[in-house]
Image: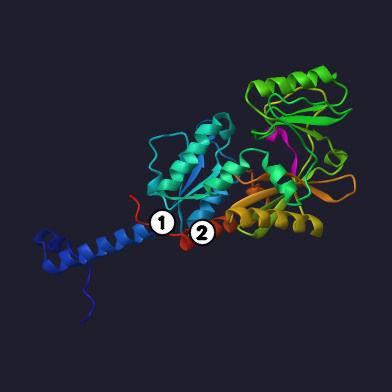
Amino acid sequence: MGERGPITFDQLLDGDHHTIQRRARATAKLRVVSEQIPKVAFAASRDALDLDAGWPLLRDGAAAAGLEPAVEVWEDAGVDWGAFDLVVAIYTWGYVLGHDSFLAWTKDVTRQTRLVNAAPILGWNSDKTYLADLTAAAIPTVPTTWVPPGATWQPPATDYVIKPTVASGAIDAARYVTSAPEVARLHVDRLHGEGQTAMVQPYLPSVDADGEIALVFFGDRFSHAVTKLGLLKADVGAIFGLWERQVIAPATPRADQLALARNVLRMVRERFGATAYARVDLVDGEDGLPMLIELELIEPSLFLDLAPGAAGRFAQQLRAWVQENPTRGHSP
């Protein structure tokens, strides 16, 4: 049988039987195609909805990868997370200000759909005591003294950093060089009063000389790296955050840096399972060998605007995550 011609206005008025059938089939086909497009929610904080320079690239990359991206506020109790095939926690900046609520949110989302990174990973990574776990697993990390509430401690002789274990963006971090020990003690006492464990670390000279290097991975594949120059000034007291004024530049990691980053993620994968995204921050020790200073698995800046093709690679990773772990069947 030959193809039917275009539907005419008279046919629509007359309600031609074949025309109605064709329209119904076409509508049903469009509905099926629409329902098959994976919906991905990028969770963000209410007070930081401007996101970053990489978001337009990621949004467009997600659409090009066959995903339907949306930005949703994680603090909004009215969001139906079950309407999405995947929820990505990448923009939940400021979650540390509502840490307990954030952890409860990760569990709530997990009951409804797929969350990346997974809730156990996010919970573990939300407290910097994860560094102790990595140290115990023979991962070279920046030497750290942990000072929980009620513990006694002695400030180092010179040039050290104090920061809380639950923080991001250098919130409440301070560097001490010539300040009297009493100033540092007051800092730790205040953190203890907030229920925080304090971290005391040496300030490494390589931070000023070469900066940190941040290696970004999507899945288990290395994507790109940047250097972050040290900006923690001495004896100026605790600060709220550094991200707005940090100097960033594209970088190529050395072989030993890349090997360490992969070893870190291998340990995470063996303990918790795969990660969809990760940023591994390294700094050189006094012996010139890399050490882990930070592992970002929750809401790291990924510097997508500084690495051509990175947003597309991330989007393809999310697409693969949806295809390998389908969750269709939740409420549309």
Front residue of 82/111: it is 111
At which x and y percent is residue 36?
37, 60
Specify the amino acid type for callout 2.
Answer: Trp
Q: Say which residue appears at 68% left-offset and 25% top-offset.
A: 149
Task: Classify 305 as above or below 157.
Answer: below
Locate residue 186: give its quadrant. top right
At which x and y percent is residue 189?
71, 20
Front residue of 140/87: it is 140
> Which label was assigned to residue 111?
none
Locate residue 203: give its quadrant. top right
CB atoms at circles 1 and 2 under 8 Å apart?
Answer: no
At which x and y percent is residue 21?
17, 66
Task: Classify 169 as above or below 35.
Answer: above
Which residue has dot 2 on it?
A: 321
Instruction: State the SS at label 2.
Output: helix
Q: Say which residue appears at 64% left-offset and 43% top-offset.
A: 301
- Magenta-tinted stretch: 241-248
Which residue has dot 1 on it?
A: 327
Q: Say which residue appears at 11% left-offset and 66% top-offset.
A: 16
Q: Does the magenta stretch include residue 100?
A: no
Q: Does the magenta stretch include residue 247?
A: yes
Q: Residues within 10 Å of mark 2 (few under 14, many from 20)?
A: some
Instruction: State the SS at label 1.
Output: loop
At which x and y percent is residue 316?
54, 60
